[in-house]
Amino acid sequence: MSRLRQRSDAGQAFPIYITVVGGLLLLALAYFAVGQAAATRSEAQTAADAAALAAALETRDQLADQWLTNVLDPDVWQAIFDGKVPVPSACWRAHELAASNNASVTCHPEGPLGYTVVAETNETVGDSIVPGTEDQKATESATAVVEARCSFDLPADNAGEDVLPSLSCKGEEWDLSPDDLVDLPKPEDLFDVHLADSQANDE
């Protein structure tokens, strides 16, 4: 009689076991689908960050070149540091970086010293138990900005043409002389480049 009861109990437990295992399997597949989506979003964010920073770095280098070209004309330095001199858009660098990260982007300037980029992954999330993911791509955005690191005071009108302002660049001092323009600040000395939501410098 006990053997019959044991067999009966085992028979009743088997469907429950199958149900529990099936539920766990579905849960695992759901977690996998969520992981796939998160990984695709991460790829899109990486592409957007890299593209925005690339465009901002290109503008930084262009502004630094402008400063070097006008190093003997301190009257225009502030306009250069404020981004108020004509430099071509660097969105082409955003598109270039996005392509290397397997994404496509839209890019537009944010004022004279920033770029906002929206990146979309070329690859989809892929097949999963969630309907529609096989065609779903991830889209993320990022904004990068250029900020001047340096300040200066223009020399007095009677100081003479052979006097250039000293640059104070976040704790580093540059004493400039028209007769010795060899050791000049580099682009990363003159400008910071970082994502708008981060103060981490990218040099």
Image (cartoon, grey):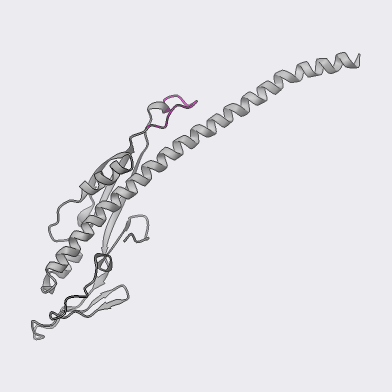
Q: Quadrant of residue 70?
A: bottom left
Viewer-proximal residue among 189 and 168: 189
Query: Is 164 rendered above or below residue 134?
Result: below
- Residue for point 13% across, 61% down: 85
**Position of residue 81 in the picture relative to residue 1 (left or right):** left
Q: Which residues are magenta?
A: 124-133
Question: Residue at image x 23%, y 49%?
Answer: 93
* Residue at position x 27%, y 48% in the image: 116
121 vs 28, left or right, is: left
Furthest-bottom residue in this view: 158
Q: Residue at x 62, y 29 (%)?
A: 24
Q: Judge whether residue 125 is colored magenta.
A: yes
Give coordinates of residue 109: x percent, y percent: 22, 50
Number of numbered tags placed on the structure image: 0
| Observer able to see residue 68 | yes
Quadrant including the C terminus: bottom left
Q: Position of residue 82 (x, y in %)?
A: 20, 64
- Image quadrant of residue 167? bottom left
Main secondary structure of the magenta stretch? loop
Across and down, in percent, residue 4 comes to 86, 13
Q: Position of residue 97 (x, y in %)?
A: 28, 46
Q: Is residue 70 left or right of residue 174?
A: left
Query: Is residue 59 shown in magenta?
Result: no
Tell me if residue 39 comes above or below residue 131 in the rendering.
below
